[in-house]
Image (spheres, rainbow, N blue to C red):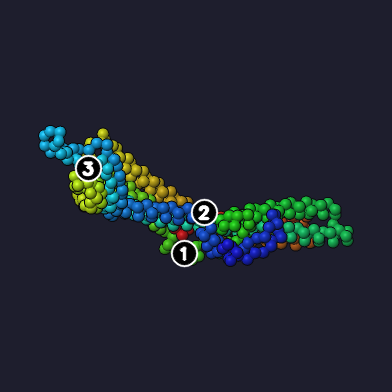
């Protein structure tokens, strides 16, 4: 499997499921997800199907060669008496037995443009399917980036939870040493232990959340049931390699699903023209080679080779309005295709605007969260100094450490929101 080639398997002791964990960077996740995604296989199969349908339509414009064999018996045959009276000779046309072996070719010469329009529509269907497969790749990339960034965020939250536990464990040891010397009360120790258990509970929850994110990422990269951790950090922006000029709304209109929708509109328009062609006459040519009995000479009744050739004119003049209703249906499908295309474009333009707004807000929130974390860390240090000088209470210090843990978790959450907004923005732009 691709994961085995790309991944480094490590054992993570903190996993709530006790499973080995696969560590992948973002390019490896994207490559594995594209290769393993069932929806991509489905899209490729649909493209193959549409291409085969296009070749089938193209074959209708080529000569059709066929072989046929018939045999029949007729109980009565035509007779003519060559004179008058019962003794007059009788001329019989065959003996009632007939057989014919035929090889022939037929070619449509004129169909009013129906076959040409059907071929054009089939070619547009191939183009649409190709673009839709590219759009599926975009969806896979978006989902993988989001799952990858969520894994990074869960890792950052778990680190914050561990730091909180380590601070409280260190403080608990200090209190235990002070208590042995008579410098700390049992009440103070109990307060620290209570806060420590709360922090450990949050650490367990953070580890479980990380496992859940890893399982979600594992499903996307084709290894369901495995925990896949993102290798990297939240500090790296997903937009780092994208020029500012390529982040404009103009790229939304260049997305493959927009191109697929336009191809579908053109396909439906071509099918309207194909239906209109059914109001025109059709002309076909046919040539057949025969080897049969009685052949062309029914009196001789011999096996005879011969050729037939001709033109066929077919022009339905009245069909109770069937073709008119077919045309109405085709035109309605054009309207539907245009409406779907307009709806898709509006949805993507709105998604782009919302992703941009979300990214701006998330960046601002992340800046504030980092500043808050720095301030809270300074405050925690000050309270700790005061505590050592007996100028602060245990409750003040415990509150300060808990607030610091919350600030560190808030920074991780805020940075995760930034990366998720970037992932959605990249998707709206066709990356």
Asked if labels 1 and 3 touch by Cβ distance under 8 angstroms, the answer is no
Mark 3 Cα-neighbour bin, 10 Å: few <14, some 14–19, many ≥20? many
Q: Nearer the viewer, mark 3 or mark 2?
A: 3
The residue that disc 1 covers is 242
Q: Give the x, y percent position of residue 79.
A: 18, 37
Element on which disc 1 rests: loop
Residue sitting at 84 percent across and 57 percent down?
Answer: 184
Residue sitting at 63 percent across and 66 percent down?
Answer: 8
The residue that disc 3 covers is 94
Real-space CA distance between mark 3 and mark 2, rounded to the nearest whole angstrom = 66 Å
Asked if labels 1 and 2 touch by Cβ distance under 8 angstroms, the answer is no
Real-space CA distance between mark 2 and mark 1, rounded to the nearest whole angstrom = 29 Å
Q: Give the x, y percent position of residue 282.
A: 22, 46
Residue sitting at 45 percent across and 54 percent down?
Answer: 45
The residue that disc 2 covers is 38
Query: Does any portion of residue 264 appear in the rendered image?
Result: yes
Element on which disc 2 rests: helix
Choose top left, top right, bottom left or bottom right for residue 231.
bottom right
Choose top left, top right, bottom left or bottom right for residue 367.
bottom right
């Amino acid at each position: 499997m691709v994961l085995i080639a790309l991944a480094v398997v490590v054992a993570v002791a903190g996993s709530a499921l006790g499973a080995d964990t696969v560590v992948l960077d973002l390019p490896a996740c994207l490559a594995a997800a594209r290769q393993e995604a069932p929806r991509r296989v489905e899209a490729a199969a649909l493209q193959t199907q549409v291409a085969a349908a296009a070749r089938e339509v193209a074959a209708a414009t080529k000569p059709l060669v066929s072989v046929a064999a018939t045999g029949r018996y007729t109980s009565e045959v035509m007779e003519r008496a060559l004179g008058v009276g019962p003794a007059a000779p009788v001329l019989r046309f065959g003996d009632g037995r007939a057989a014919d072996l035929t090889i022939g070719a037929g070619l449509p010469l004129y169909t009013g443009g129906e076959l040409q329009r059907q071929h054009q529509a089939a070619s547009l269907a191939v183009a649409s399917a190709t673009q839709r497969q590219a759009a599926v790749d975009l969806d896979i990339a978006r989902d993988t980036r989001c799952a990858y960034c969520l894994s990074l965020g869960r890792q950052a939250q778990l680190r914050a939870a561990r730091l909180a536990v380590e601070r409280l464990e260190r403080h608990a040891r200090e209190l235990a040493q002070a208590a042995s010397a008579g410098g700390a009360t049992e009440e103070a120790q109990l307060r620290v232990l209570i806060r420590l258990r709360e922090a450990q509970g949050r650490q367990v929850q953070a580890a479980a959340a990380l496992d859940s994110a890893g399982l979600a990422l594992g499903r996307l990269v084709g290894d369901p049931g495995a925990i896949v951790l993102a290798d990297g950090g939240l500090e790296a922006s997903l937009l780092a390699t994208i020029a500012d000029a390529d982040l404009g709304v103009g790229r939304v209109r260049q997305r493959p699903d927009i191109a697929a929708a336009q191809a579908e509109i053109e396909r439906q328009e071509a099918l309207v023209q194909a239906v209109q062609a059914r109001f025109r006459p059709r002309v076909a040519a046919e040539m057949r080679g025969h080897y049969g009995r009685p052949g062309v000479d029914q009196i001789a009744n011999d096996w005879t080779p011969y050729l037939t050739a001709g033109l066929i004119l077919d022009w339905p003049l009245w069909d109770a309005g069937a073709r008119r209703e077919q045309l109405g249906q085709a035109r309605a499908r054009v309207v539907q295709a245009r409406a779907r295309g307009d709806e898709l474009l509006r949805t993507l333009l709105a998604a782009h605007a919302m992703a941009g707004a979300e990214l701006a807000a998330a960046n601002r929130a992340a800046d504030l969260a980092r500043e808050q974390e720095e301030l809270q860390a300074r405050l925690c240090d000050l309270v700790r100094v005061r505590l050592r000088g007996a100028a602060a209470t245990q409750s003040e210090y415990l509150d300060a450490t808990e607030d610091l843990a919350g600030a560190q978790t808030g920074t991780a959450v805020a940075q995760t929101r930034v990366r998720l907004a970037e992932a959605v923005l990249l998707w709206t732009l066709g990356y």
